[in-house]
């Protein structure tokens, strides 16, 4: 009789909630932000367009149609289904160049983010790990250099770097990477300093873990959450900076289909043929907003304090 009552109580008691896998928990937190989900969908669409640009684009980005120079979009008077978004001043298809421009802009954003991330993590950890061996000299040198970079407006510094190195796609990546580098260095340094006082770091030191391994395998993994968010948001900043340089003629050079360069080529027709400026401008706007929305959702999902109740 007693065994039956114990079994009945065990059945009546609610079973504890089964822990969700980390990826499932992350996605459940991420999808609470509908704007972030929409932004992620747009980003995925743009990435697919960039990857399969050669298959999706109806023409070559450098192919010229002399019989359709500055043709209007298909919904405007005089437009044709042959060129859905019209053609530019040299008779090149706007839709094709926008699709291929997504490849260039995303490449710049990801390349800048990757270079800044790797170098920034290395310098940020060096500021913390070398403090004991070299005093504060390395820390002061690196942090003051980053402060000096941040003291100059980003676009002005990028223009200065490109003016010294010469306008090209590779130099654009270098210039924008220098502009965005301090964000990663300062973030890694602040996060690592906050982690050094925790018990697991003390236990690793007692166990005889060396400084390099301590920073890379013990401290760095616990600093990745803010770094991932900064990297996601840094892609949109890099796209904007590269577009600004391209508009000034200091970025990717013709005939490369880059959105900023397309804006520069079309600025003299802003009154007569406004779609030439509107299309690449909308492409930059949509991409940057989508990446920022996805980055906000990523921040909310990775930081429990930011999650909605």
Image (cartoon, helix red, strand yellow):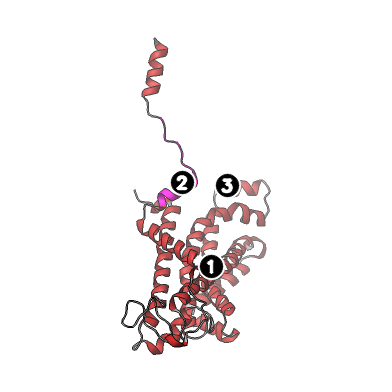
Residue placed most toward the observer, 309 or 215: 309
* Residue sitting at x 68%, y 48%: 208
Say if the magenta span includes residue 173: no
Q: Is residue 79 left or right of residue 142?
A: left
**Sequence order check, earlier mark of 3 and 1:** 1
Rounded to the nearest angstrom, the CA distance separating label 2 from label 3 is 27 Å
Query: Judging from the image, what secondary structure is the residue with disc 2 in?
Result: helix
Q: Where residue 226 appears, x then y in whole percent?
A: 49, 59
Picture quadrant of residue 87: bottom left
Q: Label 3, on which residue?
A: 200
Q: Residue furthest top?
A: 1
* Residue sitting at x 32%, y 76%: 75
Q: Is residue 141 left or right of residue 241?
A: right
Q: Are marks 2 and 3 in contact (CB under 8 Å)?
A: no
**Sequence order check, earlier mark of 2 and 3:** 2
**Sequence order check, earlier mark of 1 and 2:** 2
Answer few, some or many: residues within 10 Å of disc 2's Cα (few below 14, many 20 plus, some between 14 and 19): few
Q: Label 1, on which residue?
A: 110
Decide: is 308 above or below 144: above
Q: Where residue 184 appears, x then y in whole percent?
A: 53, 66
* Residue sitting at x 46%, y 83%: 247
Specify the label residue 195 is tagged with: none
Please report the bounds of the magenta region as a residue range: 15-29
Q: Label 2, on which residue?
A: 24
Picture quadrant of residue 144: bottom right
């Amino acid at each position: 009789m007693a065994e039956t009552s114990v079994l009945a109580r065990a059945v009546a008691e609610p079973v504890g909630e089964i822990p969700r896998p980390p990826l499932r928990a992350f996605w459940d937190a991420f999808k609470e932000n509908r704007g972030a989900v929409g932004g992620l969908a747009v980003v995925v669409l743009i990435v697919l367009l960039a990857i399969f640009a050669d298959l999706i684009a109806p023409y070559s980005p450098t192919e010229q149609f002399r019989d359709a120079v500055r043709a209007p979009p298909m919904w405007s008077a005089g437009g044709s289904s042959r060129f859905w978004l019209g053609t530019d001043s040299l008779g090149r298809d706007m839709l094709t160049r926008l699709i291929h421009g997504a490849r260039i802009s995303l490449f710049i954003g990801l390349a800048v983010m990757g270079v800044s991330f790797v170098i920034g993590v290395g310098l940020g950890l060096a500021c913390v790990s070398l403090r004991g061996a070299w005093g504060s000299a390395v820390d002061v040198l690196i942090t003051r250099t980053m402060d000096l970079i941040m003291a100059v407006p980003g676009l002005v510094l990028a223009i200065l770097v490109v003016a010294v190195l010469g306008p090209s796609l590779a130099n654009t990546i270098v210039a924008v990477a220098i502009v965005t580098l301090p964000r990663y260095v300062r973030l890694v340094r602040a996060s690592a300093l906050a982690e050094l006082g925790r018990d697991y770091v003390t236990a690793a030191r007692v166990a005889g873990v060396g400084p390099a391994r301590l920073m890379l395998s013990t401290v760095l993994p616990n600093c990745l959450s803010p770094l991932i968010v900064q990297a996601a948001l840094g892609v949109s900043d890099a796209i904007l900076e590269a577009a600004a340089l391209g508009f000034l003629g200091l970025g990717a050079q013709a005939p490369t289909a880059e959105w900023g360069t397309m804006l520069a080529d079309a600025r003299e027709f802003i009154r007569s043929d406004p779609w030439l400026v509107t299309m690449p401008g909308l492409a930059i706007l949509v991409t940057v907003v989508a990446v920022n929305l996805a980055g906000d959702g990523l921040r909310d999902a990775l930081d429990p304090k930011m999650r909605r109740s």
